[in-house]
Structures are given as structure tokens and as C-alpha cells.
Amino acid sequence: MRFEPLRFEHLRQMAEIEKEAFDMPWTENMFIPELNCADATYLVGTRGDEVVCYGGFHTVLDEAHITNIAVKSTQRGRGIGKFLMSALLAKAREKGVKSVTLEVRDNNVPAIRLYESFGFRTEGVRKRYYNNKYDALIMWLDL
């Protein structure tokens, strides 16, 4: 697998992975503005023409907010998420980021464990953030 910058041809497969991974998935059209956003950085993990995973963040001054991170359902449990997060954090460091934040659904135990393994800590909660039903943990990491 190799990581490459987000390109238009990735969007269809990314939208399919979004549907597998999230209750409120981003659509292809929602990703289009990310292609030309100066503050957005996305990495797409591919094997040949297949999108296996992707993740992205927006930078504001010296902070990064992870907007999306997902692994294709058939590829989960193989350490790909950890590989992807490592690549995203390396890219954030290259951009001079000092701290990283993200939201994760409070019952998404595999994701929470992944983030905690990188040193993310829960700093707050957004009540009923997902589908006006589930809470989001607000997690932060100091680089």
C-alpha cells in the first residue's frame, strides 16, 4: 500500500468507504471542496487502483483538526489505521503543527483505543453530536 495526496478519482471509492464506516457519511460532493482547500491535507492509501483507507485534516495556525479517517471494511483489523494515523501525524509535523484534535463517537472503542495508542487524551464531550443521539469525545494530542 502507498499513500498519495487526495485526487478527484479517489472520491467515488472514498464515499463508498464512508457509507461502510459512518452513520452520517460524507458524500462524494462533500469531499470535492477538500481538493482545492489550502488548509486541507488528505492522504489516500491505495493498492493499485483500489482505495484502502484515507484520512485528512485541516490546519488552523499551529493546530490540526482531523476531519476524516477510515479504512475499508474488508481491510480492518490489519494495522492499516495505525499506519494511516502515523502518516497523517508525520504530515502534520511537516506542516509545523503543534497539537491535533478530533472527535470520535463515544462508543467507537476500536477508534478510541487507536487514538489513545498515539497519546490522544479526552479533553471534552460534545453531547448528542452524532445523529443527535451519540456523544462525541473531543480528543487532543500534543506533538
Image (spheres, helix red, strand yellow):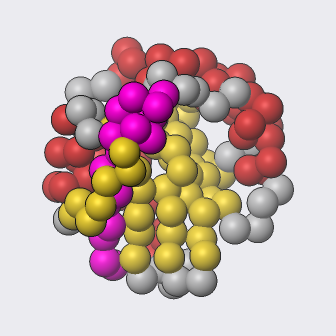
Residue 83 appears in view: no
| In the foreground, 126 or 90 | 126
The residue positioned 51% from the left and 62% from the top of the image is: 65
- The quarter holding residue 139 reads bottom left
The residue positioned 48% from the left and 22% from the top of the image is: 23
> Is 15 covered by the magenta stretch?
no
| In the foreground, 134 or 14 | 134
Give the vertical position of 85 relative to 134 (above or below): below
**Where is residue 123 drawn, in percent x and y?**
27, 65
Q: Quadrant of the N terminus?
A: top left
Residue 25 appears in view: yes
Q: Quadrant of the C terminus?
A: bottom left
The residue positioned 74% from the left and 37% from the top of the image is: 30
**Where is residue 10 drawn, in percent x and y?**
69, 32
Labels in figure, total? 0
Q: Is residue 60 left or right of residue 135?
A: right
Q: Is residue 35 left or right of residue 48?
A: right
Give the magenta range: 128-143
**Where is residue 16 drawn, in percent x and y?**
60, 18
Q: Is residue 104 left or right of residue 2?
A: left
Q: Main secondary structure of the magenta part?
A: strand
| In the foreground, 116 or 125 | 125
The residue positioned 21% from the left and 63% from the top of the image is: 121
**Where is residue 58 drawn, in percent x and y?**
60, 63
- The quarter holding residue 9 reads top right
